[in-house]
Image: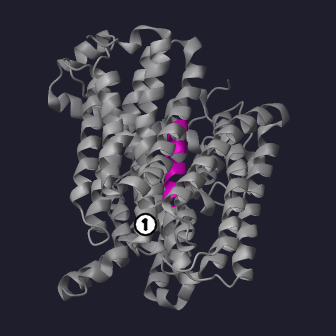
């Protein structure tokens, strides 16, 4: 029996993209909910679980880098985007099945590494699916299709998270890997394989290019992405504030990350109840997304988003107060006496939080569209979304560390206070009429100076970081963000300045990867048994930020206004 090509009809296309997005949501729900729950039951600490969940989001923060490769490398036999989807889903299935052989918690590092590979291919799949959607959906189908795609991702997260936890009570945890891999394989066999992607003439021509030409084309696309993103971000005050808005927490985030499942396990909730909690919060949040978007259209995006972001802290503060009243401060070993009063409080707080978080999600993306330049909409909006994923990864990490250092109440309080800080940026994030003004060059210089000073500030901090005591987790997260932002600025700034950067252009290219590698400082102690390597690594933790700070300050002194990429753009 020949299976239908779903791209051949309107109903088929909508069905295909709904099902394809389910395969994107399943691994996320599986790792962030089901696996995180099992790790806590096996005695893994909140800090390690936070790092595990955070690493799972990292590939999505850099998925923009995969776009050029999906664009220029294509298969004549399997189809351009269809070939990428087949390849990525095959790798996703194989990596999930291979996890069965990894013992937990002893092999957590290997488990995390394999899941990181898995999610990298998941992010590449997302790029390929979006590209296929752009090239096959007609204009009158795109609105409904996007709604169905987000719904598919939500369904996938529920299947991979709640579905697995509800199943574990009957089958144990090991079979869940085959269940999740099988769910993806079903879509591969019955949806992706029968697809017949329309041939595009430019794609046929691109197949004839040599591998060297393809790599060069990918490099050119990445450079153009860097220039377009940089120019759009510094073009107006609102667009630049959008960068900080995307990198800051989107309200209090603790009840939407691993902290919730960690606490649920410690309070004695069985797997099926944790699964039910996750399922109900997903359903409530999905409904609130629709309501939040509708209200923002009626009442204005900035006022409604302000209310949503602030009210997300209320359930977090309520849970903090209840935990403090019951003397539940530091993490406890799973398997203790059940605490029904605190379980009820967690249910109430989580369900209320799902309402406010859903309202926020229904509005946040829309306000980012308001400050996006239509001429480079795909580039700028993709970059904003990538930064938001980076913010989630960082939040998951610092909260896990903070719980072990400060306890639950203090971590929740810090989250409730720092989460809404992004609302201070909302007044400038208005719908734009001009997308590049005369102040763009000044903003570029100011950003270079600010990042350079922050990199240099690392030197006195790291020399005496033990003095910060329990504040170290917050400082560590701050400098991680500084190093990532500095690396991206160097890579994009050197392309924008071009020859105007002088010798600093090459220096920026060498320093940027080393700044990304500064994240490895978290495992510096593992080299203590090899003194020469340990001393060399310690030296690099000082030298790299120092060099980065000097290069950034040097770039700030260059003539940004002379760059053609910094000239004011036309109004729209």
Q: Is residue 230 above or below residue 35?
A: above
Q: Is residue 443 above or below residue 228?
A: below
Q: What stretch of residues is rendered in magenta?
A: 380-394
Q: Is residue 338 above or below residue 149?
A: below
* Residue 519 is inside the magenta segment: no
Residue nearest the observer in this picture, 196 or 510: 196
Based on the displayed image, in which of its 4 quarters is residue 201 positioned? top left
Residue nearest the observer in this picture, 45 or 113: 45
Q: In the visual, does 74 lie left or right of 123?
A: left
Q: Position of residue 562 (x, y in %)?
A: 51, 42
* Residue 387 is inside the magenta segment: yes
Q: Main secondary structure of the magenta part?
A: helix
Look at the image and tell me whether residue 554 can be seen: no
Q: Position of residue 29 (x, y in %)?
A: 46, 49
Name the residue: 42% across, 39% down.
Answer: 24
Quadrant (top left/top right/bottom left/bottom right) for the C terminus: top right
- Label 1's element? helix
Q: Position of residue 327 (x, y in %)?
A: 68, 85
**Which residue, as the protein is rendered here, is positioned at the far front?**
170
- Report the residue marked by disc 1: 51
Q: In the visual, does 352 lie left or right of 113?
A: right
Name the residue: 69% across, 77% down.
Answer: 323
Q: Position of residue 377 (x, y in %)?
A: 55, 30
């Amino acid at each position: 029996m020949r299976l239908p090509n779903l791209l051949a009809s309107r109903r088929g296309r909508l069905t295909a993209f709904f099902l394809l997005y389910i395969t994107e949501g399943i691994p996320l729900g599986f790792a962030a909910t089901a696996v995180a729950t099992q790790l806590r039951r096996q005695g893994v600490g909140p800090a390690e679980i936070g790092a595990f969940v955070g690493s799972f989001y990292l590939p999505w923060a850099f998925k923009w880098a995969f776009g050029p490769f999906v664009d220029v490398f294509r298969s004549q036999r399997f189809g351009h985007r269809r070939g990428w989807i087949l390849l990525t889903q095959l790798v996703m299935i194989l990596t999930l099945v291979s996890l069965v052989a990894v013992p937990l918690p002893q092999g957590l590092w290997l488990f995390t590494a394999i899941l990181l590979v898995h999610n990298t291919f998941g992010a590449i799949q997302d790029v390929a699916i979006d590209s296929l959607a752009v090239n096959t959906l007609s204009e009158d189908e795109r609105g409904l299709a996007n709604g169905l795609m987000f719904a598919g991702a939500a369904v996938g997260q529920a299947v991979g998270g709640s579905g697995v936890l509800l199943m574990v009570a009957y089958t144990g945890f090991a079979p869940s890997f085959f269940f999740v891999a099988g769910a993806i394989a079903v879509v591969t066999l019955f949806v992706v394989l029968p697809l017949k992607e329309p041939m595009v003439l430019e794609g046929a021509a691109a197949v004839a290019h040599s591998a060297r030409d393809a790599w060069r084309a990918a490099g050119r696309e990445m450079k153009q992405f860097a220039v377009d993103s940089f120019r759009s971000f510094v073009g107006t005050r609102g667009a630049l504030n959008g960068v900080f808005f995307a990198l800051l927490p989107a309200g209090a985030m603790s009840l939407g990350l691993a902290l919730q499942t960690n606490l649920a396990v410690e309070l004695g909730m069985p797997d099926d109840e944790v699964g039910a909690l996750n399922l109900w919060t997903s359903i409530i949040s999905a409904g609130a997304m629709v309501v939040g978007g509708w209200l923002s259209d009626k009442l204005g995006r900035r006022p409604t988003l302000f209310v949503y972001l602030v009210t997300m802290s209320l359930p977090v503060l309520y849970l903090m107060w209840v935990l403090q009243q019951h003397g539940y401060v530091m993490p406890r070993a799973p398997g203790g006496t059940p605490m029904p009063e605190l379980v009820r409080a967690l249910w109430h707080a989580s369900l209320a939080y799902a309402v406010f978080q859903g309202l926020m999600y229904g509005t946040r993306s829309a306000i980012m569209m308001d400050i996006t330049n239509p001429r480079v909409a795909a580039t700028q909006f993709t970059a904003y979304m990538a930064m938001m994923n980076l913010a989630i990864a960082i939040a998951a990490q610092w909260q896990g560390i903070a719980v072990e250092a400060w306890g639950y109440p203090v971590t929740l309080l810090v989250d409730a206070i720092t989460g809404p800080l992004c609302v201070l940026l909302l007044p400038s994030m208005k719908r734009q009429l001009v997308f590049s003004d005369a102040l763009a060059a000044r903003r570029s210089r100011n950003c270079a100076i600010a990042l350079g000073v922050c990199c240099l500030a690392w030197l006195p901090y790291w020399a005496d970081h033990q003095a910060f005591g329990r504040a170290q987790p917050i400082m560590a997260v701050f400098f991680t963000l500084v190093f990532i932002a500095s690396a991206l600025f160097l890579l994009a700034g050197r392309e924008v300045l071009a020859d105007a950067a002088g010798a600093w252009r090459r220096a920026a290219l060498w320093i940027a990867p080393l700044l990304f590698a500064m994240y490895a400082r978290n495992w510096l102690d593992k080299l203590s048994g090899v003194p020469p390597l340990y001393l060399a690594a310690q030296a690099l933790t000082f030298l790299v930020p120092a060099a980065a700070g000097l290069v950034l300050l040097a770039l700030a002194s260059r003539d940004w206004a002379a760059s053609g990429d910094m000239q004011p753009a036309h109004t729209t």
